[in-house]
Amino acid sequence: MHTSGTSGEVGYFLYAPADHARLRAAAMRNREVYRGLFPRAHLRPRRIRVAFYGATGGHFAGVTSISSLQQGVRRLFINAQAFEVNTPLPQVVERINQFRPDVLWGYTTALKMLGEEQRAGRLDIKPVAVAATGEMVTTADMQFLSAAFGGAVASSIYACTEHMMLGISNPGTDTMTLIDDDLVFEFYEDHSIITNLYNFTMPLIRYRMSDILRPVSAPGARRIVIENLVGRTEQMPVFVNSAGAGDFISPHTINEIFVDGVTRFQMQITGPSSFRFPICVDAGLDSEQRTAAAAGVKARLVEILEQKGLGNVTFEVPIVADIALNERTRKFQLIIPG
């Protein structure tokens, strides 16, 4: 699987079937933690319907996990479908209405878009649980999702490509329980260190992450409980299509742009139907290769916009020497609002 590349560089991580088996065993040992993701759904006399709304065009952790639910004995109990976040929103609403999921899972901002569609009456589903992941999830986000979907249990899932499932929020609280059977957590003021004990294929020993985890459980407690994780978030670009309606492009979709020679890029919103997309390229590229790299990015952007029904949106792709960090956070920002 690979990361989204929001740190400025895509990371690739390998798992063997035996590693996944150890991961599933840990999930079985933590059934009480996972219970909030499937409340009451097991009482229904049919397979549980699980919908994932996110990026499906790569080997991301989210779509890989949802695909795994359709393998082996799990497919007898779960009917899981993935819905591409870069599909025009009206089409997604129509398909999810047809599927009528019991559990709705996806990127935080994308789920909030569906919540607005539910409130407007265009989406009409009754999930018993909504799980947000991939972006920052606040208590207010979970309250909104629960209210929008008729009192569904809303949870925040803490996961990453390197270690998969790390924790799940505790319903009705501002805390989260870590899944620490096969993960060793070390807490520091400005970062965390995690050792992965289940992935024998690509061992990650004392792997540093920028996530700041703050334990709140007492020493000797059976589980590690932390303050509800506040992760990284990105601006959600919304553009006006040719029909005059607004639709969004997920940052995760923008991160799916992989072109040889391109090392970094940024979307800079310049208007309701326009943006600038500067790119950095390898210093060793000659003039012809630089032109080819820019052309490759342009082609991928056209594909993304056409897929989303935003073919009217205009943009430019200049090659620049560097893309500056955010002056306040000192971190790379994928999307700059206008």
Image (spheres, rainbow, N blue to C red):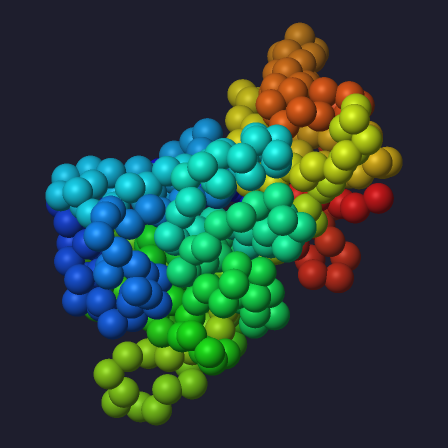
Task: Tell me the quarter of the image containing the C terminus.
Answer: top right
Q: How many marks?
A: 0
Query: As displayed, is residue 299 above or below residue 332?
Result: above
Residue 175 appears in which quarter of the rendering?
A: bottom left
Is residue 131 among what the camera can see?
no
- In the rendering, at what x and y percent does residue 1 appear? 35, 38
Q: Decide which of 139, 154 is in the foreground and name it.
A: 154
Residue plotted at (68% across, 46% down): 236
Residue 287 appears in which quarter of the rendering?
A: top right
Query: As displayed, is residue 200 above or below residue 329?
Result: above
Q: Decide which of 81, 271 is in the foreground and name it.
A: 81
- In the rendering, at what x and y percent does residue 154 appear? 47, 65
- In the rendering, at what x and y percent does residue 74 appear? 18, 45
- In the rendering, at what x and y percent does residue 38 appear? 32, 61
Residue 250 in the figure: left or right of residue 174 = right
As drawn, which residue projects farthest toward the top? 288
Residue 165 in the figure: left or right of residue 250 = left
Q: Decide which of 326, 16 is in the foreground and name it.
A: 16
Residue plotted at (67% across, 50% down): 120
Residue plotted at (71% across, 42% down): 237
Residue 169 in the figure: left or right of residue 322 = left
Query: As displayed, is residue 281 above or below residue 338?
Result: above
Is residue 335 among what the camera can see?
yes
Q: Decide which of 251, 293 is in the foreground and name it.
A: 251
Residue plotted at (57% across, 31% down): 91
